DNA sequence: GCAATATACTAGGACATCCAACGGTTGGTA
DNA sequence: TACCAACCGTTGGATGTCCTAGTATATTGC
């Protein structure tokens, strides 16, 4: 993005917190703010890589999810809960993926309420290629210390379980 | 949010990555995805707490930044670089904060190009109260293990420095 | 069968972000 | 001194996400 700052603004904010008598909350504040900023950096990278494929991160996530599903199809509702996004967001994403020919809607064979989203052949190809690009340009060079990644996964996993995201190990 | 999932979808995705021959990228993918999801959870909490104050996170960040600045005022550009957002986002945020009476624009005394953003008395009060609310309801009960917070700050700090966010310790 | 629930779509609005373009200002330089 | 490149903030337009309804349909429980 721009030029690097001469100082870490989050470290400065933490100091400000401590100086104002919020010593107990200073470190969590810094951690939360760092998460926000890190997400921003990662999202920018991901969207940059996905742009040539005409995909956004939200659409890519749906595409990737479908590519791992049996038959490459899932009920809308299932996608909504697995991706933890609003049902209307799925509707929106499916609309655009369908316009791009990567996905197709079809009625559920037994439950007349639910509609299935299904990968097209094109969609499967797009999923493969965009995943390869992300692996090469983002995940394969994430910028996290290799020994830090497991720590990160554990810490964030604990947090998410604690936040009621999922149940289990 | 909704009901907790019976399984961790990120752990499942990681397994899928490994099963498809992307073993090297599986862990970084899981870490990146976990960051995304954690940010989503935290942002939802923060916006929930800020809603009664008529603030969004973007606007709160600007308000908090101003409250720590000398005289409670900063050039727009300075705010843009410190918060790492586009100048137009600052314009947008200042517009709304100004409409709410929390902030005021004033010309720079010597440089005719830059305009200063300045906290009003109301703005300073809002900053104090919203910060107190965030400290009590989010940062003070972040859900991170206390011993994990320092790890998190270090890991994400390394990442951000590596990503060119800032220079220094 | 009937009522309560569940699913998905639509319409509308709020919000943040990015981009290109513009007018005003500044400061270095020919 | 006069000029010009660089900088600053704003504008307008476009994208994208999320949310709140309201509606239609289908399912499930009583």
Image (cartoon, coloured by chain):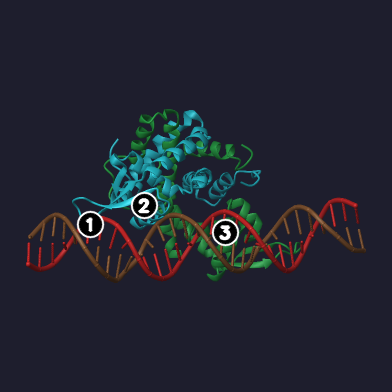
Chain colours: A cyan, B green, C red, D brown
Mark 3 surroundings within 10 Å by alpha-carbon count, few (fewer than 14), some (14 through 19), many (20 or more): some
Position of B91 with respect to B58 (left or right) is right
Tell me the tag on residue A14. Answer: none
Label 1 resides on the chain identified as A
Mark 1 = which residue?
Answer: A113
* Mark 3 or mark 1, whichever is nearer to me: 1
Of D20 and B63, the residue lying toward us? D20
Position of B127 with respect to D9 (left or right) is left
What kind of element bears circle 1? loop
Q: Is residue A81 above or below residue B110?
A: above
Mark 2 surroundings within 10 Å by alpha-carbon count, few (fewer than 14), some (14 through 19), many (20 or more): some
Residue B134 lies, in percent from the top left, at: 45, 55
Of B12 and A55, the residue lying toward us? A55
Position of B168 with respect to B27 (left or right) is right
Say if labels 3 and 2 share a chain. Answer: no
Q: Is residue A55 above or below residue B103?
A: above
* Mark 2 or mark 1, whichever is nearer to me: 1
- Quarter occupied by residue B69: bottom right
Task: Decide which of tag 2 and tag 1 comes sooner along the chain.
Answer: 2
Tell me the tag on residue B89. Answer: 3
Residue A136 lies, in percent from the top left, at: 50, 34
Query: Does the rendering let one see residue B142?
Result: yes
Mark 3 touching mark 2, by CB under 8 A? no
Mark 2 = which residue?
Answer: A85
* Mark 3 or mark 2, whichever is nearer to me: 2
Mark 2 touching mark 1, by CB under 8 A? no
- For marks 2 and 1, give the CA distance: 20 Å
* Residue for point 52% across, 43% down: A49
Say if labels 3 and 1 share a chain. Answer: no
């Amino acid at each position: 993005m721009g030029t690097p700052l001469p100082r870490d603004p989050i470290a400065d904010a933490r100091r400000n917190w401590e100086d104002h008598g919020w010593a107990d909350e200073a470190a969590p504040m810094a951690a939360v703010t760092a998460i926000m900023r890190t997400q921003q950096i990662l999202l920018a990278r991901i969207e940059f890589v996905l742009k040539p494929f005409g995909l956004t991160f939200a659409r890519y996530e749906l595409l990737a999810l479908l590519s791992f599903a049996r038959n490459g199809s899932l009920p809308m509702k299932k996608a909504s809960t697995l991706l933890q996004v609003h049902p209307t967001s799925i509707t929106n994403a499916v609309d655009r993926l369908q316009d791009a020919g990567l996905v197709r809607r079809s009625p559920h064979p037994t439950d007349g309420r639910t509609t299935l989203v299904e990968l097209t052949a094109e969609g499967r190809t797009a999923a493969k290629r965009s995943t390869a690009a992300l692996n090469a340009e983002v995940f394969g060079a994430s910028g996290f210390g290799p020994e830090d990644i497991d720590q990160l996964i554990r810490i964030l996993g604990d947090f998410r379980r604690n936040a009621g995201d999922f149940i289990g190990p």
